[in-house]
Amino acid sequence: MGVIEETFAGHEVSRQSLDACVKCTICETMCPVAKATPLYTGPKYNGPQGERYRDGASVDHSLEWCNFCGICTLHCPQGVKIAELNEQAAAKMKHQNGVPLRDRLIPLTTLEGRVLSPIAPLANWGLKQKPIRIAVEKIIKVHRDAPMPTAQTETLSKWMRHHKPAKPATKGPIVFFQGCAGGYFETETSKKSIEVLEHLGYEVLVPKQGCCGLAKQSNGLFEGATKDILSLCDKIISLGKGLTVVSSSGSCVGMMKHEAHEIMGVDDPRLHDVSVRSRDFSEFLMDEYRNGELDASQFRPIDITVPYHQPCQVKSQGMGFPAVQLMELIPGVKVLESNKPCCGIAGTYGLKAERYEVAQKIGAGVFRHMQDHNEGVGVCDTETCRWQISKSSGVKIVHPVWLLHHSLGLSDNLFD
């Protein structure tokens, strides 16, 4: 079998949900992309309706405008795997028509981190220069105004070499999974996550780890994504059996928990082993709180109202709003959720030159929410969403762990 057949094991599973579609069009009314542009004919047409005719064959090119946010699947009352069908069909289309150079380069996040970190000041300066960004847009087709990560001189792995827990562990070991961005760009969030977990008594194990493959999957590169996720599973499994895996990268842990299996059809015992014990950072701590393992009385008050946006890739995990519940364990904290489906970036979607304006329209409500309700800071669970919202709103956007870190007296840079 060719690559596309081998990596489409999940396609038949998704197709089994087709006949449950009753054409209620709820997915159409909830779709943020269809609201932003007429170029996308909607999730029902491209999903269950189109799939009945294509059976995985090349499809209407309006599907290229889908950002695979998963809102359609989340709201379908019949349980139709709409987003999964669309992403599988888009991957098939790219396999048939060819994957653009840009879509092969963007997902190389680990390589990008390794290249940029040693020259972080120069790289960050260069990415702010308009002539350079214009050239990148014309050659690579990444929009000149799209948000870019900030490279860090000290990667998380470098920090871990000299890091010592502030106090001995009183609880069992857990594995921390930081994701590519958390290892090279959003290192401060990873450090705060580790320090909070250690402060709460956990022994935090941080394995050498690579990419989870999410960016490759989103760009139709299923073969490479499958290799990445299974390699990551091997590294996590090497630390011991049954250890809980905690991640402050909300989108990457979603790849581990369900996307690799449900979208790419990865049916491997290593993935099954790791996925069932993987938890989002806020999800894990709220589980601990409900089990009586987290004493909320140790949180110092912060008198603040924080606007919060739950990313679509966190919504798709179906775990409610643990970040809201966790932050509101801190006395004085009031959280205002955006009630918007998507910020527009959708991983790499909003970076692409031809989709940038659509992505901005999709995220406009989130940007206004942050501008209207912030008292110096806003909150969001995933890295690319934070970059998108921060750049487009002008508001400092942080992970929920920043509030916990501040409340526990471990830092004072929440508002810097």
Image (tube, rainbow, N blue to C red):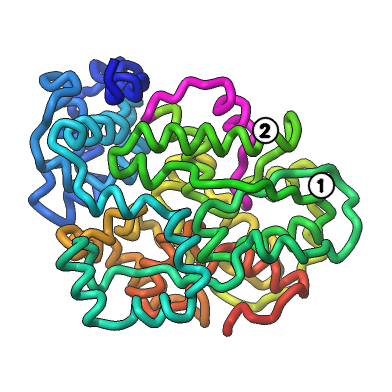
Q: CA–CA distance between discs 1 and 2? A: 25 Å
User: Toward the viewer: 40 or 374?
Assistant: 40
Q: Are marks 1 and 2 in contact (CB under 8 Å)?
A: no
Residue 267 position, x and y percent, is 47, 20
**Quadrant including the C terminus:** bottom right
State the residue at coordinates (78%, 59%). 296
Point out the tag, 1 or 2, that comes first from the N-terminus.
Answer: 2
Q: Is residue 212 visible to the viewer in this orientation of the structure? A: yes
The question of residue 390 being in magenta is answered with: no
Image check: 398 left or right of 342?
right
Residue 196 position, x and y percent, is 74, 61
- Up the image or down, 237 lies above or below 303; here it is above
Identify the amino acid type marked 2.
Answer: Ile
Dot 2, how many residues are within 10 Å of its Cα: few (below 14), some (14-19), or many (20+)?
some
Residue 227 position, x and y percent, is 45, 33
- Up the image or down, 226 lies above or below 416; here it is above
State the residue at coordinates (23%, 59%). 352
User: Toward the viewer: 359 or 168?
Assistant: 168
**Quadrant including the N terminus:** top left
The dot on residue 358 is none
**Does dot 2 land on a helix, a strand or a loop?**
helix
The dot on residue 293 is 1
Residue 328 position, x and y percent, is 64, 62
Give the residues in magenta: 263-281
State the residue at coordinates (19%, 61%). 141
**Residue occupied by mark 2:** 237
- Up the image or down, 71 lies above or below 55; here it is below
Depth check, mark 1 against mark 2: the one in front is 2
Res 242 quadrant in image: top right
**Does dot 1 land on a helix, a strand or a loop?**
loop
Res 305 quadrant in image: bottom right
Identify the amino acid type marked 1.
Answer: Glu
